[in-house]
Amino acid sequence: MKDPLSKIKPVVRSLSAYTLDPIETPIKINQNENPFDLPEPIKREVETRVRERAWSRYPDFVPASLLERLASFSGWRPDGILAGNGSNELIQALMMVTVGPGTRVVIVEPTFTLYRLQASVLGGDVRSVFLDANLAFDPAAVERAAIDEGADVVVICSPNNPTGSFYDLDDLDRLLERFDGIVVLDEAYHEFAGRPATSLLERHRNLVILRTFSKAMAMGGLRVGYMLAAPEIAAEVTKAKLPYNLNIFSMAAAEVAIERYDTLLRPLVELLVSERERLLAEIRAIDDLDAFPSAANFFVVRCSRLTPAELFSRLVDRGILVRNVSRYPMLGDFLRISVGTPPENDALLDALRDTLRGEKKA
């Protein structure tokens, strides 16, 4: 009997797809999204610009206008920038041009599972370096894995998803200097840390930075990401990127978001950082809860009295959806919580206090 599945790569059939449980609640703080919608002045300007375009025509093959704005916004040269349909597309394109059977890829974990998934599908030899016991980066361990074990590609997410850990820029500078492979730095949450690695690009041709408009820029529904790299690296990654990968609506939205960032979006980022610190302090004051430091718009929490599944379920019952990350390496006791609006954060704190108070009485 014919079995077309036999033609699928065995390594692919052994993997689990990236997925998310379809649970709906009034308060959704499980996906590290910006809880504030894109401001109305930005929306109106985007609508005006898109209406002026011919929708029957393809977008610009090279989005020169967007690349120029990204160059000004990021402080990097336009010929070293690629725009993508979310940074996920650029992760895939970068992996396609760097990873093949036997390519040694070092991934600092626990982290975003798409890195390992993409590298494995392409036949890469994936090696893990783990965070330390405090869920902080161990730069010495990363260097050993990269240099002593002959890695070709190193993938670091900083601030790291799901832990919020930040990779010190001096440590990154040293790694880039000593390592002759490519270092991929995913800075999807860099706006919340305020310490971007762009300054290292000029000195290190082996650094590739990935960023997104989905988080700080409040554009998760529009799917825009970008890559910063040496121009010769960007030219090679372009070969794996699909043509016309950004639609005219997303491109216009990205341009307007950049133009209005300082006046309309940066204040929201600053509010989320302030709310992150408030949440961390107040959750640590609740008996049996421990919240770990974070440089992102989320953090991980450990409960000593309830399992992650139990606490997750109690919060869902209160209309609050967080992320159960207990299946990640090292995170068997943890939930991840994204920072919401101040009222959403107040509701979360009330739910946590009530849940653990009730559990204590029981």
Image (spheres, helix red, strand yellow):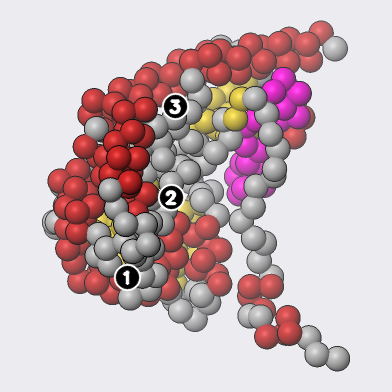
Write the residue at 49% across / 59% down: 115
**Residue 149 at x, y percent in the picture:** 41, 70
**Residue 280 at x, y percent in the picture:** 49, 20
Q: Are discs 2 and 3 less than 8 Å apart at CB?
A: no
| Up/down of 324 relative to 69, above or below | above
Q: Are discs 2 and 1 less than 8 Å apart at CB?
A: no
Quadrant of the frame with the C terminus:
top right
Q: Nearer the viewer, residue 51 or 138?
A: 51
**Label 1 Cα crowd, 10 Å radius (few <14 / some 14-19 / many 20+):** many
- Report which residue position mark 2 lands on: 223
Label of residue 36 in the image:
3
Q: Nearer the viewer, residue 237 or 68?
A: 68
| Up/down of 344 relative to 36, above or below | above
Q: Nearer the viewer, residue 225 or 186?
A: 225
- Report which residue position mark 1 lands on: 237
Instruction: Tell whether 206 sits left or right of 118.
Output: left
Give the residues in magenta: 312-331
Secondary element at tag 3: loop
The answer to which quarter of the image holds residue 22 is top right
**Label 3 Cα crowd, 10 Å radius (few <14 / some 14-19 / many 20+):** some
Mark before the other along the chain sequence, 2 or 1:
2
